[in-house]
Amino acid sequence: MPLAIEDYALIGDCHTGALVGTNGSIDWLCLPRFDSASTFAGLLGDDEHGHWTVRPVGAERCAERHYDGDSFTLVTRWVTDDGEIEVIDLMPMGGRRADIIRRVRGVSGTVRVEEVLRIRFDYAAAIPWIRQSRSQRGTGEHEHALIAVAGPDSVVVRGPRRHADGFAHRSAFEISAGETVDLVMTWFAAHEPPPPMPDVARSIDETRAWWTNWAQHLDGEGPYAGAVRRSLLVLRALTHQDTAGIVAAPTTSLPESFGGDRNWDYRYVWLRDASLTLQALMLHGFAVEAEEWRDWLLRAIAGDPADVQIMYGLGGERRLPEWEVDTLPGYLGASPVRVGNGAYTQFQGDVFGEIMLALEQARMIGVGEDRVSWPLQVALLGHIEANLERDDHGIWEIRGVPRRFTQSRAMVWAAFECGIRAVRDHGLPGPVERWEGIRDELRREIDAHGFNEELGCYVQYYGGTEVDASLLTLPQIGFIEPDDPRMLGTVAAIERDLLRDGLLLRYRVESGVDGLEGEEHPFLACSFWLVQQYALSGRISDARVLMERLVGLANDVGLLSEEYDTRNERHVGNTPQAFSHLALVRAADAIDRARKHEDTGPLRLEDPRAT
């Protein structure tokens, strides 16, 4: 049975990632990319569906674990009656190989260690042919090799000699203080020869250096500096090193409701999430990432703007058909397990606003427009103009009836506002008078139909009476001042209707707006948005109290999932979730700005302190 979601830590190489449990088991791994089929999928079933466990004999849970500095090298400490060991888990950076290293180091005494390896390719559908390999083994006692092959996939696993136990392979060895035993798995295409054994010590050093170098520009100021630092590192870990595509999470089908069917594949690049991630990185000085992501975007949406999708594959792939995996029962029985995401065909108007805001921010930090990038933005605005009367599925990708979602319409307003500023402030060419007319009409429309005078608040969609946490983004994009009475009324309604045990739901599922059965839990990004709103509107004490609670929900290595079960105090949904971490960064930034100017009242949107 898999562990609680918060009991997993991420290791990764910016190509893919693995989840390592507090019990020493790797229960999720897709090779060689985030969106490849799984090699270990015990997370969505049990041990029979694939795992790789290394721990002291008889132990169930580690004593402590942490990341090595700013890296994603996981150091897990085990204490037994016989002594103490560390297991160092990492996916090496820089070598462009799909390696997993598990170095066992003796700290004190002599500890007997067990290893259980169960490889299941293709979402546990393919049991591989496994053989001992003399040609790949070394000369030492712990330098044996196994090769597993099934279809296009193959791995070579080096380390102690393993013996077959049904469909698993096991080994056991003793390790004393000062000794090390290295276990290494390397993926390779089945038609190729196995890659050579990596230099483990060198890989550990180079991986630490790579992450340290990337993080050297991060500042260490503010009460939430540690959480911000780890969150930015998570965002980088979810960014593909070659393509610059940013996955929403490295997992699929971790449920939004335990035992339910709200289970989705997040191993793709949402333009919205990627744009927001980029904005968070740019605010902390990562201009190179901005340019790389812009280039990814230009490649992904090249062609007719009418064909723009809300999400793509890591390399810009457009077809992401959704299908159900019958070989995996789901996390704690939450089925179905899904691969692909049917929402890629949806129209979501808010995405265009996020793209334009991210590209505007890139322009503001000095990323110059080229002969493709600005014409693309003009074409996107033309596409939006041609679809102004089109209802959409909203930021939450509802699978119910398309509507005029207020937040989506405000994001369309923001898209045209960005285009206007590009012409007026930066001298770029474009039909600015027409854009200004559209922008102004959108504002009149939103105020007339998206604001309910009787309720005194903005509503989820035109003509509705429900609120939605996404309305908290309206001040963030400059549509309304954070302390405007209409916004304060909206915040009051959101607090009244959407707070559950002090954290925010996205919306009330009881309204039926999303067309799905079941319930869900508070969405962490929404609560971080509320922190941001509190800070911008002068409620700094409330912002700090909520922020302290949210930061405290991170697991022992600083990771956040998508949602949080307040009743059972558990992480819920795919993990680690880019949306949660980028929202943490933006909330911390808002508190920091407000704290520095606490005596001057709420920040105004035209004030440079507010951006």
Image (spheres, rainbow, N blue to C red):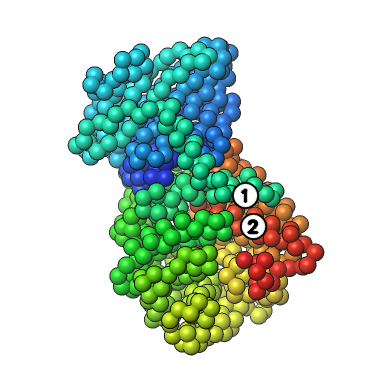
**Residue extending furthest right?**
599
Residue 357 position, x and y percent, is 51, 68
Kind of residue indicated by mark 2: Asp
Pick whichever, 587 or 220, lies toward us: 220
> Would you call the spot at circle 1 few (<14 residues within 10 Å), some (14-19), or many (20 or more)?
few
Residue 65 image position (x, y, % from top left): 56, 31
Residue sitting at x 40%, y 49%: 240
Q: Which residue is mark 1?
A: 219
Q: CA distance from mark 1 to mark 2?
A: 12 Å
Quadrant of the frame with the C terminus: bottom right
Q: Kindly identify the amino acid type of the residue bearing the numbered disc 1.
A: Asp
On residue 589, the disc is 2
Q: Secondary structure at mark 1?
A: loop
Quarter-wise, where is residue 91 in the image?
top left
Against 122, residue 491 (above or below) is: below
- Residue visible at 51% across and 72% down? 411
- Are the residues tagged 1 and 2 within 8 Å (C-beta)? no
Residue drawn at the location 39% of the way across and 24% of the way down:
183
Residue 566 left/right relative to 579: right
Question: Image check: 546 left or right of 47?
Answer: right
207 displayed left or right of 166 = right
